[in-house]
Image (cartoon, rainbow, N blue to C red):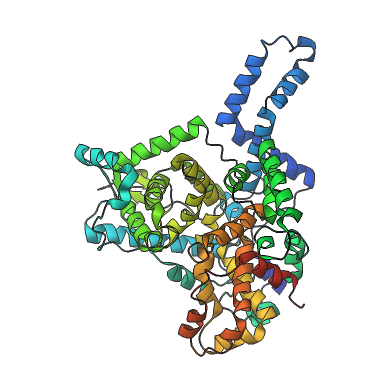
Amino acid sequence: MLPPSRTSKPRRFRRRANRAPMKRMDDGTELSLTIAQIVQRLKGSHLHSQIERQAKECLHQPEIKLESLKEDVRSFLKTSGWERKLQNAVYRELHVQLPPSHPSAPPEHLKEPLAYMRKAQASWEKRVLKSLNSMSTELEVPLARMRPAVEQKELTNKWNEMGTDEPDLSRFRPVYAPKDFLEVLIGLRNPNHDSSEDVSIKSHWGLIQVPLNVRDIPQLRRAYSELNLTSGQLGIDDHAHIHPDLFENEYVQIGKKVVVEQDSAAAQQYSRQGCPTGLRADLWALILNSTNQPQDVMHYEQLMAGVIQHDLLVDNLIYKDVKLTASNDDYYFVFEDFLYQVLLCFSRDTAVLEHFKYNSATPPRSYIQGKGGDEECAVVYPPNGVIPFHGFSMYVAPLCFLYNEPSKLYSVFREMYIRYFFRLHSISSSPSGIVSLCLQFERLLQTHLPQLFYHLRQIGAQPLRIAFKWMVRGFSGYLSTDQLLLLWDRILGYDSLEVVAVLAAAVFAFRAENLMEVTSLASAEAVLADLSTLKVIPLIQIFLFATAI
């Protein structure tokens, strides 16, 4: 649809033209739609069949009376723990599903309401897929092939020590790097928005030039109130002159109770002030409702069998990425085998496709060999719909510190990906999406350190060009692991990636004095090259709660 001419409609209509026309629903209708969606999704789940079986089995128990059947069955499910499992499953669905929308809204508008964002994402997907197909053609490597029996046996034998393998990967290159993606984001424009008359865009000196609503510091203070300077936090009290008994011992005891209670909502609230090292693995799994049941272990083993049977071109990209990133990292090189196992299985997991229902992206498709152009022969490639890029393996690496059982590590990573990480490499208007994070970072820095922002801009060192690589990885590989895990505690606790943008701005604020003296992009990058000594939580607290407004 062509954008309306500037003379045809008043500006207030032009600015709304890019949004899908939807009627506002009342709270009752919205709640009913949410309940219907969740019921529908849970009906086909393994949990539903388990609860149904338990309910039927309990009918044979003497304490179940016909005259109070409904209440007795409900009481049994509650006392035997099934009600809590159902609550956690519902809580999980509330965090991953689409927000309820008007029934008449087109599906693509539900995934992303802004047409120009949808168009940019589709264009980027074509570019990435073209790059992958070109690599396949140039290197004469098929996108997928059945492994010969000898190769299958060899891979089975070395499954737990794939890091010792040294395949020749010199011909393979990452499909794209974060800096390529940044250039696309910098070029984003809303064709129906007159930026010359918008004060907020006109005065914005940053690289991101789209009109999205991002929170300022007063709003962030309200949203992240548990991070205020007077609240106890894991991650700072052990560095302060406070006896640990005053906060940490009591806090750990509360954490143990949360784990025993197995309540996802309570675990999420608890992690806002940080997770104790010994409880973090259990708390994260609880927040994500990652239970590692026998069926989850079986699913992982099926994926492993798929890796052994078929060789994919993207396997080489995964190997190359691990070699270029985690294998060269002082913290993560010991987990090389785990990373191969998890990422190779992830690439084949069609369950990951579920997240495309609420992701602005669509899974890439390729044609069966010799059937190019025939839509009936188009298949999702790779099977999970996610083409790995340079640095992708760093989403998994920190989790290796928490989980030493591959199936458990896998299920937690997959849930982290479909809740959070996909947003870091998809073009969307989501408040947790990378476009909003970039804009928020620039706004925070421009508003509260305008001289620094202007100085860096003048010497050709736009702050976002430095901070983008941190944000697109959620700071993995840049912070020391203990600090990174404290940051990810808050991502899970607040169910948002917003804190990543806040930390990026806080790092610039912390190094502001040195940055004011640099005269080039290279020297600015040198000042910010090593973040491994930073203490994350004090930085965020000071930036949010000690900044003069």
Q: Is residue 301 visible?
A: yes
Compared across the picture, whether 72 is left or right of 372 comes to right
Q: Position of residue 164 (x, y in %)?
A: 28, 52
For the image shown, how many numbered marks are present on the structure?
Answer: 0
Q: Position of residue 467 (x, y in %)?
A: 53, 73
Using the rendered view, name the quadrant where residue 33 is placed. top right
Q: Position of residue 76 (x, y in %)?
A: 71, 21
* Rendered view: 276 above or below 408: below
Comparing 267 with 362, the one in front is 267
Q: Is residue 198 visible?
A: no
Comparing 541 with 257, the one in front is 257
Q: Residue at x 39, y 57 (%)?
A: 333
* Rendered view: 450 above or below 78: below
Comparing 165 with 303, the one in front is 165
* Rendered view: 441 above or below 84: below
Q: Position of residue 549 (x, y in %)?
A: 77, 77
The quarter of the image holding the N terminus is bottom right
